[in-house]
Amino acid sequence: MDSSESKWINKKKILQLFSPFCSCAREPSQVKQESPEVGKNLWKANRASREENDIFREDNKSLWRENKALRGESQAFRRDNKLIRERNQLLQEENQVLWELKKTSLEKQNVKALNTQRKSSRQQKRAREAQLKALKQQEIAFQNEAKALDEEMRSLNQEIRALHHQKKAINMEEQALVKEGIALGKEEEALWKEERALRKENKALREEHSALEEEERALQEEALLLQSWYNFLQERELNSITIK
């Protein structure tokens, strides 16, 4: 109920209260019976207004507590997302270091193979007799190296597949983070809307509170007016009895 409707109802109540009072100008005994009832009705109306205001205040407190809890939950999600992004960054840096180490290892193996080949050439020049033996040793070395390279290629292929899976997981995680960011944005927008609605509601409650205070003052003035009229009618009745 807004303040204008409350004022209209109060005016209606005042008119209803004054209507029997006007008729009581001719019937003083009826005024005596209805005046306490009027005061009782006014007291009940004021009490109901205060109870309604207390209920509104409790509802507002509950809504503020819920908003505070939601804000804390949103901040926790943001902190978790930040930690996840930092961990992903560290993993990417570690993968880059591993790639550099593997590249260095391959370069060292190539240099070692070249040195072995040069040494074999020098041995061929020194002694033809040892040429066949050196070639066999070189062939064995190449076979072993080929096996090692095959194993390394298989390991690299496995690592590449693992990196693809990791990249896919990172992409999925990134999409999840984007969705989470969108959800957080919507949640933040909803919280802002809720806060604005609460502000409007609090403003309306303050206005209604002011209206109820004005209504209470008007009822008190009305009660004083009724009491003065009641006293006037009693004096009038006593004077009429005395004259008779």
Image (spheres, grey):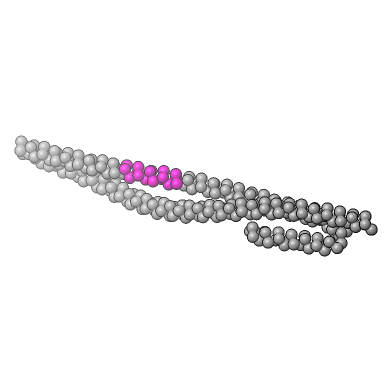
For this rendering, which residue is in front, 235 or 77?
235
Image quarter hosting the N terminus: bottom right
Please name the predominant secondary structure of the magenta segment in the image. Answer: helix
Left or right, 13 with respect to 117, comes to right
Which segment is the magenta one? 78-94
Q: Tell me if 81 is positioned left or right of 157 in this view.
A: right
Left or right: where 186 falls relative to 25: left
Residue 94: x and y in percent read 32, 42
Task: Please tell me which residue is depicted at 77% across the width and 54% down the height of the picture.
Answer: 225
Asked if the stretch drawn in magenta spans residue 200, the answer is no
**Residue 110 percent location from the top left of the image:** 18, 42
Q: Which residue is drawn at 61% across and 53% down?
A: 207
Do we see residue 214 in this rendering?
Answer: yes
Total marks placed = 0
- Residue 205 seen in the current view: no
Above or below: residue 147 compared with residue 1? above
On the image, the x and y values in percent for residue 43 come to 76, 52
